[in-house]
């Protein structure tokens, strides 16, 4: 990999090391950023240096606490500009999303984050239950599919019914607000903790 | 595994299913709680049921936001009683710990959480640097060890210097407060998010 001025600039910005040493480090490590930082650290020239973010997003890390600190929610909601990030419409929406997470305890943002094994497990249970209920074979696949979709509606934030208006999903709530906000809004990640719960759930 | 009244009670509390069906489910699954829940779900008797927490701790999920929502911190601090959890001394300590995390961005609570590979990587860099600096062989191991310990002081919350009094580590800060608080205090887990940072760091 050729060492570009861009790469040198990035390494220099992160480590504060001079241009010549940054070039030498990148050349010695085939242009690998992480290995170039190690190279500079081995020479005693730099401390550990976190890479500057390439796609620094705007938005907010919104916090919400419930029950005198028994439940805590942290959610990162992104938008495109700092101007919108500071707007009341955006902040209100981020707060509603945090409230939703506190109240409805989703496990994922979107359905494509659900591990395949978890979906298979749900399908197995739905199938066993349909057999137990004596459902005819020709509708079995449809019933199983319907129940797995319902499971997704329950565990995915974007598919959950909005706690203040059950006719809306959170995805629709966000879309409704995008018009007023004026740019796209993305829920990037969230964590919801309950005091004393198992940490590997 | 013999099915005990305790196990039936726990399953009943979590699922709301009657005693007889809970016993049947546990007997059919060898007393395995998770499989017993699946058994009841397959029969259409129960919904997915999270196990009640066995060691429900007291304390607080403390939140702290910095830079108008550019940095968010969530930390769970445990104590032994609800009474202490509501006390000002405990709440103040939890708040100081959240502030520390926001300011000093530790990666772990304690040193034993650092992955072995990360420690080895630090040792490798320290060794290469010591060679580069022409340190004599007989002190090499000691120098490497010293630098790895320094690394631990930087990345572990409990070993960090307290931002308001650098003569104290966070561990010592907590110990100092335990006398006033009257029971043991444990930092169980924390998350520190910056807007737009890479999520796999």
Image (spheres, coloured by chain):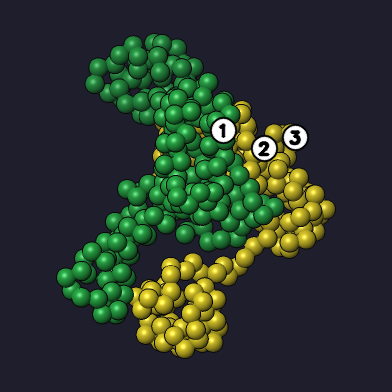
Chain colours: A yellow, B green
Q: Residue at x 74, y 34 (%)?
A: A164
Q: Is residue A145 left or right of residue A43?
A: right
Query: Mark 2 belongs to which subunit?
Result: A
Front tag of 2 and 3: 2
- The image quarter in which residue B143 lies: bottom left
Number of marks drawn: 3
Q: CA distance from mark 1 to mark 2?
A: 23 Å
Instruction: Report the residue marked by disc 3.
Output: A165
Q: Secondary structure at mark 3?
A: strand
Query: Mark 3 belongs to which subunit?
Result: A
Front tag of 1 and 3: 1
Q: Using the image, determine if residue B124 lies above or below residue B73.
A: below
| Along the line of sight, the residue nearer the viewer: A41 or A187 | A41
| Along the line of sight, the residue nearer the viewer: B27 or B76 | B76
Q: Residue at x 43, y 26 (%)?
A: B183
Q: Using the image, determine if residue A138 lies above or below residue B126.
A: above
Q: Where does residue B33 sit, x and y in percent of width and height?
A: 36, 25
Q: Residue furthest left?
A: B138
Q: Which mark is residue A57?
A: none
Disc 1: CA contacts within 10 A as few (<14), some (14-19) or many (>=20): some
Q: Where does residue B123 sit, x and y in percent of width and height?
A: 29, 65
Q: Residue at x 36, y 59 (%)?
A: B150
Q: Same subunit under labels 1 and 2?
A: no
Q: CA distance from mark 1 to mark 3?
A: 35 Å
Q: Which mark is residue B91?
A: 1
Q: Secondary structure at mark 2?
A: helix
Quarter of the image with the N terminus of chain B is: top left
Q: CA distance from mark 2 to mark 3?
A: 13 Å
Instruction: Report the residue marked by disc 2.
Output: A99
Q: Same subunit under labels 2 and 3?
A: yes
Q: Is residue B3 left or right of residue A166?
A: left
């Amino acid at each position: 990999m050729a060492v570009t001025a861009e790469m040198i600039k990035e390494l220099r910005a992160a480590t504060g090391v001079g241009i010549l040493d940054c070039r030498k480090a990148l050349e010695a490590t085939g242009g690998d950023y992480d290995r170039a930082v190690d190279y500079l650290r081995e020479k005693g020239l730099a401390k550990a240096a976190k890479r500057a973010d390439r796609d620094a997003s705007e938005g907010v890390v919104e916090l919400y606490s419930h029950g005198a600190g028994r439940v805590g929610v942290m959610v990162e909601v992104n938008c495109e500009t700092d101007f919108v990030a500071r707007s009341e419409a955006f902040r209100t929406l981020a707060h509603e999303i945090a409230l939703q997470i506190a109240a409805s305890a989703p496990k994922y943002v979107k359905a494509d984050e659900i591990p395949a094994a978890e979906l298979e497990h749900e399908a197995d249970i739905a199938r066993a239950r349909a057999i137990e209920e004596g459902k005819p074979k020709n509708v079995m696949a449809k019933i199983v599919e319907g129940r797995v979709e319902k499971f997704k509606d329950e565990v995915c934030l974007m598919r959950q019914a909005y706690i203040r208006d059950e006719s809306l999903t959170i995805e629709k709530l966000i879309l409704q607000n995008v018009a007023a906000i004026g740019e796209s809004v993305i829920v990037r990640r969230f964590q919801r903790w309950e005091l004393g719960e198992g940490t590997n759930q």
